[in-house]
Image: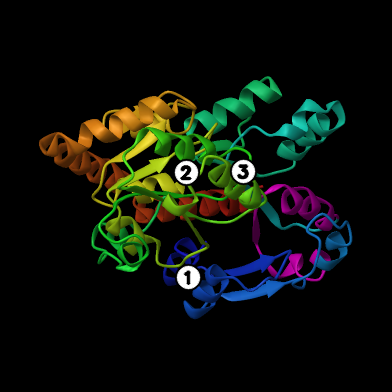
């Protein structure tokens, strides 16, 4: 949203951002600084509170299109539009979730997708996951790959923060929320197979942070693993690292991975859905949850400077394919098609 919404505004689209939870974050401050109006339901608001339906009713008539992300906005916005003509678009980032193990939640998801004028999937795999779940493809589904401002990462000046924390070390970094679908555990375990000169920097936060800190402590690696929290200087941190890793159980299309590809350093990723597609032929894939192989790949690159540089350049070339300008064009085209079809109807 930080990168996309200002570009939509520059292209003549009046756009606001509504948050179910209005907690002040660096991302919110950044988007407000770029001139985007932010509406929120309060910093302590529960995103799953059904009262959000009534709160939404105050706003939905003000817009031609409402575009939702994540489950509670997806489902509550449908109910808030009862009797309204506003068009609905949603973006699916994964296409699979733990809710569908429960029969009633699965029924709700199938019903929900049919209520949208357009379901945008961030990758082909995401679309395939939804089709497998529903049992058929719908005309309202399309794929628009996520994108980033690639120039911010390709041209970033390296931060001195990592060197200040661990002077003279070899620096491995992963940028991701501490959520169940991520696999920081394998990356932490790989440090056991690397020399003491290697340090790991974990950027992000989430419900598993305390658990991961305990894993690092139990393995007696706390002095070599640094939890940096949520940061706004990601491009600079990536440029300062020696190796960028995305260790995960599954992905949709990870923007953090695209950012890593553009950093000018080797990008290493788990060989899983969502990472395999963007990494193969550019960065290096390692078997899912295989800490030893991950460490071996890093050591091999460390001992082969020519390969290190070749992989780094291939990663940048691949990352350029996901520039946000392409994503912006496709979103605008999607919105226009929806509005044009409404006028014809």
Q: Which residue is mark 1?
A: 9
Q: Secondary structure at mark 3?
A: strand
Q: Please say whether residue 66 is one of the residues in the magenta stretch.
A: yes
- Indicate the position of residue 175 as horizontal and vertical percent values: 45, 51
- Mark closer to the chain start, 2 or 3: 3
Report the residue marked by disc 2: 254
Above or below: residue 69 compared with residue 273: below
- Which quarter of the figure has residue 134? top right
Coloration mode: rainbow
Q: Position of residue 164 (x, y in %)?
A: 33, 67
Q: Secondary structure at mark 1?
A: helix
Lateral position of residue 231 relative to residue 194, left or right: right
For residue 243, the mark is: none
Identify the residue at the far front of this view: 220
Q: Residue tagged by mark 3? A: 118
Q: Which residues are magenta?
A: 56-82
**Which residue is located at x 73 percent, y 54 percent?**
73
Depth-wise, is mark 1 or mark 2 nearer the camera?
2
Residue at image point 63% right, 21% down: 132
Vertical position of residue 339 compared to residue 273: above or below:
below
Query: Circle 2: is it few (<14), some (14-19), or many (20+) Cα within 10 Å?
Result: many
């Amino acid at each position: 949203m930080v990168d996309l919404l200002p570009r939509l505004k520059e292209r003549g689209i009046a756009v606001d951002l509504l948050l179910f939870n209005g907690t002040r974050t660096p991302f919110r401050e950044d988007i407000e600084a770029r001139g985007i109006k932010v509406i929120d339901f309060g910093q302590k608001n529960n995103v799953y509170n059904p009262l959000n339906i009534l709160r939404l009713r105050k706003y939905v008539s003000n817009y031609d299109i409402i575009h939702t992300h994540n489950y509670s906005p997806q489902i509550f916005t449908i109910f808030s539009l009862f009797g309204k003509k506003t068009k609905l678009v949603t973006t699916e980032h994964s296409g699979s979730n733990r809710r569908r193990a429960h029969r009633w939640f699965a029924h709700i998801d199938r019903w929900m997708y049919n209520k949208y004028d357009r379901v945008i999937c961030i990758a082909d795999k995401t679309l395939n996951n939804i089709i497998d779940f529903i049992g058929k493809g719908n005309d309202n589904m399309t794929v628009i790959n996520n994108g980033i401002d690639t120039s911010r990462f390709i041209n970033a000046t390296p931060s001195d923060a990592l060197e200040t924390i661990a002077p003279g070390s070899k620096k491995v970094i992963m940028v991701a929320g501490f959520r169940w679908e991520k696999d920081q555990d394998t990356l932490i375990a790989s440090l056991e197979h690397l020399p003491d000169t290697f340090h790991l920097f974990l950027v992000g936060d989430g419900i598993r942070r305390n658990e991961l800190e305990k894993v690092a402590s139990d393995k007696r690696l706390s002095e070599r693993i640094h939890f940096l929290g949520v940061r706004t200087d990601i491009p600079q941190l990536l440029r300062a690292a020696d190796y960028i890793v995305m260790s995960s159980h599954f992905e949709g299309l990870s923007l953090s991975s695209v950012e890593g590809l553009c950093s000018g350093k080797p990008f290493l990723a788990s060989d899983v859905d969502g990472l395999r597609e963007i990494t193969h032929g550019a960065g290096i894939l390692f078997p899912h949850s295989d800490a030893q192989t991950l460490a071996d790949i890093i050591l091999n690159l460390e001992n082969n400077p020519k390969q290190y540089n070749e992989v780094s350049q291939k990663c940048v070339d691949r990352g350029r394919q996901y520039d946000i300008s392409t994503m912006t064009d496709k979103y605008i085209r999607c919105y226009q098609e929806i509005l044009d079809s409404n006028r014809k109807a």
